[in-house]
Amino acid sequence: MNFFNNQPPNAPTIDGKSGKAGKEYKYTFVTIDPDGDNISSYIINWDDGTQDIVDCSVGSGKEVVVAHKWNKTGAYTIRARAKDTENLWGPWSELEITMPKEKITHSFCCSLMFDKSGSLSSKYDSLG
């Protein structure tokens, strides 16, 4: 390989989904190297104060799957970049996700309004 003509890897594609805080999710990273060099590592910033450096040594275009869990609700931007076996870093890519709060279900909400006999609780009489 001619070092002077070598190009860095492309920005990785990041695939994954939003979810609930406190639950672990898997994210897939795929990077193409224009020269066909293997991808030697990724740096992943999870936007929650943590980052991973993943040593992987995979072929160009091959998937790397990394799991992460956010402990707090919020919107996050996952940022990642890849390095090839020629020690060239590619550009960053991003994926925006959210980890919303748990939703209150209808049955839970309604159970607060009714007493044990199924009648509307007296504390809600003033609403109607």
Image (spheres, rainbow, N blue to C red):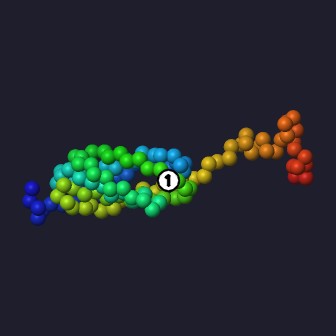
Q: Residue at x 30, y 55 (%)?
A: 42
| Residue 88 locus on image (x, y percent) | 21, 61
Horizontal side of 122 relative to 32 (left or right) equals right
Q: Amino acid at mark 1?
A: Trp
SS label for mark 1: loop
Q: Report the residue that reaches farthest toward the top.
A: 117
Q: How many marks?
A: 1
| Residue 81 locus on image (x, y percent) | 31, 59
Horizontal side of 92 relative to 95 (left or right) equals left
Question: For the residue carrying disc 1, how many other residues have a C-alpha within 10 Å: few (<14), some (14-19), or many (20+)?
Answer: many
Where the N terminus falls, by quadrant?
Answer: bottom left
Horizontal side of 116 relative to 17 (left or right) equals right
| Residue 54 locus on image (x, y percent) | 31, 52
Q: Quadrant of residue 47?
A: bottom left
**Rendered position, 121 above or below 87:** above
Q: Is residue 32 visible?
A: no
| Residue 35 locus on image (x, y percent) | 17, 54
Q: Is residue 123 visible?
A: yes
Q: Residue at x 22, y 46 (%)?
A: 59
Horizontal side of 40 relative to 17 (left or right) equals left
Q: Report the residue that reaches farthest toward the left.
A: 2
Q: Residue at x 32, y 46 (%)?
A: 64
Q: Residue at x 87, y 35 (%)?
A: 117
**Rendered position, 30 above or below 47:** above
According to the picture, the residue beneath numbered tag 1 turns out to be: 70
Q: Quadrant of residue 9?
A: bottom left
Q: Quadrant of residue 8?
A: bottom left
Q: Report the residue that reaches farthest toward the bottom.
A: 4
User: In terms of depth relative to the viewer, which is nearer, 70 or 17?
Assistant: 70
User: In terms of depth relative to the viewer, which is nearer, 70 or 75?
Assistant: 70
